[in-house]
Amino acid sequence: MEITARAPGMIILAGEHAVVHGYTAVASSIDLYTVVSLRLHSENEDSIRLQLEDVGLDFSWPIKRIKEVLSHLGSPFSSTPTLCSLETVKSITALVDEQSFPETRIGLASGVCAFLWLYTSILGFKPGTVIVTSELPLGAALGSSAAYCVALSAALPAFSDSMELDVNKWAFEEEKIIHGRPFGVDNSVSTFGM
C-alpha cells in the first residue's frame, strides 16, 4: 500500500521582517505543492530510503545501522512531538554524514535530518521508501521546507499506531531542525492553507 500527501507552499504578503520581532504578518498559501509518497516494505527489506526526486538525491539507511545510532530514542514516540534534543540531532547528523552528499546540495542536509527524526519518531524502525517531489523552488521564500515538513507529517501517521497526530506540531518540530528558530508561520499556513 502507498500513501500520498501534499502540502502547499506559502508567501508572506506583508510583515515578513516584522515576524522576526514578534509582530503580525499576512500570509497565504499558494498553488504550488510538495508531494510525499510513502510505501512500507516487508521486514525482509531492511532499510529506510528517501528519494528527493527534483534534486536527484537518493539516500538509504540500513535499519540495523539506524538502530545502532538511535537506540537511545526508544520507538516510536507518543502522538505529541517532543523537542528533538541536541544529542538526537548529533546522532541523526552522523547518519546523514555517512551518505554521499554532493557539496552543491549540502544545504539540504538539515532537511534529511528532519526526515530521519520524523520517520523514526512516528514509525520507529519500519522499513520503507519515501519519495518527495515538489513544484516549489528551494530558497525562494515560498515555504518549500514547510511544505516538505507538512507533507511528511501528513503521510507518515497513516502507517503508525496513532492516527491522531497533530500535523502542524510535528511539522514545526521538523522546521526547528532545519531552521533552528522558526516562527511557525510557514508550517501553519502550509498545514491549514490560509
Image (spheres, grey):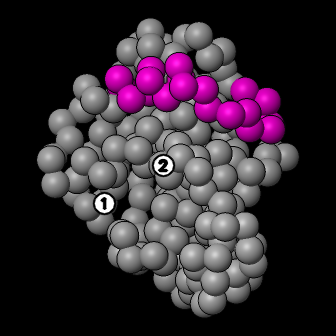
Kindly state the secondary structure of the residue where label 1 is placed: helix
* Residue depicted at 69% across the width and 47% down the height: 170
Amino acid type of disc 1?
Glu
* Disc 1 residue crowd, few under 14, some 14–19, many 20+, Cα 10 Å: few
Query: Front-most of 29 and 126?
Result: 29
* Residue depicted at 44% across the width and 9% down the height: 68
Query: Front-most of 178 and 120?
Result: 178
Kindly state the secondary structure of the residue where label 2 is placed: helix
Amino acid type of disc 2?
Ile
* Residue depicted at 29% across the width and 65% down the height: 54
Inter-mark Cα distance, 1 to 2: 19 Å
Residue 117 x/y as whole percent:
54, 34
The quarter of the picture where residue 120 lies is top right
Name the residue at the right extreme.
164
Magenta residues (range): 77-95
Q: Does the magenta stretch include residue 168?
A: no
In the displayed structure, does residue 10 sit left or right of residue 79? left
In the displayed structure, does residue 141 sit left or right of residue 59? right
In the displayed structure, does residue 176 sit left or right of residue 107? right
Q: Is residue 76 above or below residue 155?
A: above
The quarter of the picture where residue 76 lies is top right
Residue 7 x/y as whole percent:
59, 70
Q: Mark 2 points at which residue?
A: 178
Residue 59 x/y as whole percent:
30, 39
* Disc 2 residue crowd, few under 14, some 14–19, many 20+, Cα 10 Å: many
Mark before the other along the chain sequence, 1 or 2? 1
Q: Mark 1 points at which residue?
A: 53
Q: Looking at the rendering, in which quadrant would you find the C terminus?
A: bottom right
Q: Residue 35: which numbered mark, if any?
A: none
Residue 117 appearing in the image: yes
Query: Front-most of 127 and 92?
Result: 92
